[in-house]
Amino acid sequence: MDINIMKISEIMKKTSQTINPSNETQEKVWNQVIEKTNRNSSFLYNIKRGFSYAFLVVILIRVGTLTMDLTKSGSDNTKTSTNIEIPNDVYYSDTDSIMSNSVKPQEDPNRNEINSNVEIIPIESTDNEANRIKAKTASINISVEELGKNVNSIYSLIEEYDGYTENTSISHSYAKIIIRVPSTNFDEMYSKVRLLGNNIISEQVITEDKQTELDNIQHTIETLQAQIDELTSQLNTETDIYEKKELENQIKRLNEDIVSLSKDKNLVLIETSYSTIEVFLTLATKEQDATKTIWIDLKNVLNFWLGMLVKMFVGSIFVAPIVGIIWVIKKVLKILMKK
Amino acid sequence: MEEANLIVEAKLGNKDAWQKLYEQTFTYMYKFVYSQTLHKEQTEDILSESYTKAFLNIKKFRAESSFKTWLYKIVKNELFRNFNKNKHIIQLTEEQEELIGKEDKDLSEEEERRKTKSLQILVQNILHKLPKVQSEILNLRFLLGYSIKETAEQMGISESNVKVIQHRAIKNARENYSYLLSNNS
């Protein structure tokens, strides 16, 4: 059998003749078509489709939000992820304020920490650094199942660590307690506060190094004291009564400055002797959390698309005249062609 | 009733008009799909899905081409969508190759039936080894019996283009199956 155009066409034509649907097949497919058409145009089917699309939209919103979150976290490399391992150390950031997380909490597999804002840049701690005087301020938002129980736990901790409550406000779903605790006990107490509740919604620890400020004050006091000593020796040898009076006045002013600086130094020491912990307890069931999250997500996505629409609208203002001109030229050319 | 009237009626939701359009086109579409799948149930699924889509979207049909052309595009898309998921190409056996080479008069009734099946497999093999455009031209020209002009209209290309592609398709098919044909010559 030699192959040529005719042969292939012959084979195919012959095959075509052999492929013949039976009446039964034709009827069967027709019934399927009618059934599918009725089903696809039914109210219930469209409702189902509506739900499917709604589900798809929710998934898209979630994906969109996740993408936005990823973009945000990608732009800020210093921020930590949720599952960070927090070293038992003090950390310094590039800025003047020092962010730290002092004590690593005990590992709990059921604990889900979200949106932890602790900025961590570890450095080797030295004895000098350990002895430095620092003012610490912590703010922590914890999701809890029982408000009363957790508030009592905080009060027990305050008592245990010789602290005191600066301010308390409690509602049926929310509690805010501002605690002052001796700086020496801060790390230990804060680590215990972190273990309360279900999960940490957000937290921030700011450590401000006051050592430099104190050193500066002390240095100024010493300089002033040296000046006073010098002036006193001059005063002892001076015979001129007017010069003596002037020296006395200068010494008096310098002494006043030293008193003022000493007060400042004491204030700093008092300030750093106690640290502040702001504890926010939020009563949130899982359902409430989910609703809140979806609502925030929806808001973010709506904002995003609204922004896009505004951009498109602004863009169309520039594009519309060009399209209009092209359309007019096209029409004119058409008329000319007809003529 | 003319096709144009049937379409108007079908657009209005007349199921009798639908059925007539279905009857007029079913055999063509069946041949086209079956030649590619060689599977009865798969062919039926593809066709029922395609006709459902066609009838649900008939309001979008603007009669710029014939109904058959429009439907063919729907069937073709559905075939590629479905067939890509469940691709099943049967390979020719030596026995089948032998049967293809034999004259019909030398065959018993049973052998003739088997030869028919072997030819269907050969056609499927030929079509699947060719690029999509070439296999489509062979399909339209020889399986569905379209003229060059009709094929050009169906594919939206010029007649001379159809001739060129057809020539290439046959040449490729020859190259692919020369071993089979020379053995049986």
Image (cartoon, coloured by chain):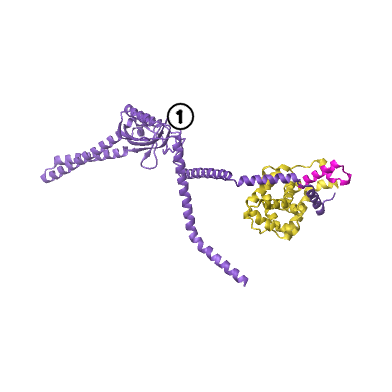
Mark 1 Cα-neighbour bin, 10 Å: few <14, some 14–19, many ≥20: few
Q: Which residues are magenta?
A: B98-123
Q: Which chain did the image draw in purple? A: A
Identity, as a three-letter code, of the amino acid under mark 1: Asp
According to the picture, the residue beneath numbered tag 1 turns out to be: A108
Q: Dominant secondary structure of the magenta stretch?
A: helix
Q: Is residue B88 visible?
A: no
Left or right of B181? Residue A132 is: left
Quarter holding the N terminus of chain B is bottom right
**Secondary structure of residue under mark 1:** loop
Q: Is residue A27 above or below residue B4?
A: above
Instruction: State the count of labels.
Output: 1
Give the left or right position of residue B4, taking residue A215 as reference.
Answer: right
The picture places residue A98, in percent across and down from the top left corner, at 37, 39
State left or right for residue A226 relative to residue A173.
Answer: left
Residue at image location 46% in from the left, 29% down from the top = A108
Tell me the shade of chain B. Answer: yellow
Q: Quadrant of residue B2?
A: bottom right
Label 1 is found on which chain of the structure? A
